[in-house]
Amino acid sequence: MNAFWIILTGSLVATCCSLLGCYLILRRMAMVGDAISHAVLPGIVIAFLFTGSRDSIPMIIGAGLLGVLTTFLIEFFHRYARVQADASIGITFTWLFAIGIILISVFAGQVDLDQDCVLYGEIAYVPLDLWLTDSGLSFGPRTIWTLGFVTLLIIGFILVGYKELFLTAFDPGYAAVIGISTTLWYYLLMTAVSLTTVASFESVGAILVVAFLVGPPATAYLLTDNFKTMLVLSVAIGVVAAIVGYYLAYWLDGSIAGAIATITGLQFGLAFLFSPLHGLLFKNKKAIPV
Amino acid sequence: MILQVDNPVVEVHDLTVSYDRKPVLWGVDLTLPAGSLVGVIGPNGAGKSTLIKAIMDLLPASSGYVRIFDEPIKQVRNRISYVPQRESVDWDFPASVFDVVLMGRYGKLGLFNRPRKADRDAAMQALEKVGMQAFADRQISQLSGGQQQRVFLARALAQNADIYFMDEPFAGVDIATETAIIELLRTMRAQGKTVIVVHHDLQSASEYFDWVVLLNMRLVASGPTEQVLTQEMLEQTYGGKLTVLSKVGDLLRKQEFPARER
């Protein structure tokens, strides 16, 4: 049963991250996802200090605000301080993450979080943190409920905003002319990324979030030329990584999050070599029709 | 030579646009007549694209205002279409030709609606108009420059707008596409649509457009083609360097170098 809960957690995180990651890589913003996944840390700690509990809702609000602040700061530094976009990303998230680390170390006694947990997560402990009613009835691990809810929210968001997200990613100028607000959809997407990050944070850690945000979408991008297929395929790739990664870790007796991230890298390597569309081994054989 | 018209479709008042506090377009004041094919012409860096982007409110204006169909732009968004420069998007995006053309219908659909059969039919008709119906399922990365331009044009046509802004639609396309596009623009004009085209080829300009806007950071001229495209006006626009340019052009033609890309 424990294996089931751990794999389910990994799969839920993979689903949210892979879906949003598709939009991020097509907008050439994969590193913004990376930045958000780190920069939400001070938001989580501050929310914890205010409420004194590890309840999900204040944390999600705190992290959501920090995520939007991060994207805003990245834009702001890029546009007004006129540094390059990547430099702007680098300065923003390291700085915010560092503030989070300081907050944790200063309030170490009160904060039920540590740096290791933030970076690597503790997916192996997911089955231990059960949601029990007063009468002792168990609904299964708490994380599954939070993540399940967030996953539904993300899927709903993409179903409702499919064409707007598609168009603003492909051609923002045209979108603006026909009256679809690029700024609104940009911030909605970033809020969704923050939400996913914070929900996944405790269980899988920042590194696995980044791996899922970029790895499966990049692999799917190599395998298909159709955007809808890319969304579905990247989810499937992410879920496979969660399952295979778990058994790899079990076999090696090592870190589960680490093993899953390794598998996403392997998948990308395989797609890079063997993809029928863009794979290295097939590239010379395919003539592009005119 | 700045001619103002009565009942204009586009009305630009004292428009100044700056990048990084440096004005790139100064005090443009013009009106455009309905149902015309308008060419926006000027040297590189003259602010041609900036002008149409500022008119469509894609760039913030430092001063001045724009009215289209005598309304602020926000009220008439669904009557406006735009054909951006081809290079402005990533053609490796996982989308088919049909996906891109269908985007032309998104503005009318609103948030919760998916494209219906009527929208698909409109997109397919637009593809037929540009002669690309056979390419509907083709991945966009496999298109030539001219085909990409036709796809963008089809997307704008699918929108069925009343006024079209086009940014360099003739740049880097083959001669067959150029002829097809200009034919299409003339049909649109015959249907009473207004088309505003950023253009850089002076030779074809007099043949293509019936109203010309000459621009070089300031508005040099705006009026009917035959009154505006004169040696004097062009020298004002191109700063007297035109003679050098035309000599180079003559030289190239004599030696039969292809002056056009591809």
Image (cartoon, coloured by chain):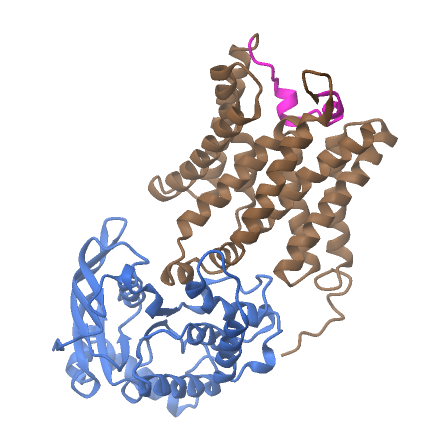
Chain colours: A brown, B blue
The magenta-colored residue range is A110-129
Q: Does the magenta stretch include residue A121?
A: yes
Residue furthest to the right in view is A251
Residue B74 lies in quadrant: bottom left
Total number of numbered discs in the rendering: 0
Considering the image in quadrants, where does the C terminus of chain A appear?
bottom right
**Residue A245 appears left or right of B10:** right
Indicate whether B129 appears above or below A238.
Answer: below
Residue furthest to the top in view is A109
Q: x, y percentage for residue B101?
A: 50, 71
Q: x, y percentage for residue A127?
A: 75, 25
Q: x, y percentage for residue A61?
A: 49, 29
Considering the image in quadrants, where does the N terminus of chain A appear?
top right
Residue drawn at x 67%, y 28% is A143
Residue furthest to the front in view is A135
Q: Is the magenta stretch mostly helix, strand or loop?
A: helix
Residue drawn at x 68%, y 50% is A234
Report the front residue among B34 and B87: B34
| Residue A206 in view | no
Indicate whether B48 appears above or below A245.
Answer: below
Residue drawn at x 19%, y 59% is B65
Residue B260 lies in quadrant: bottom left
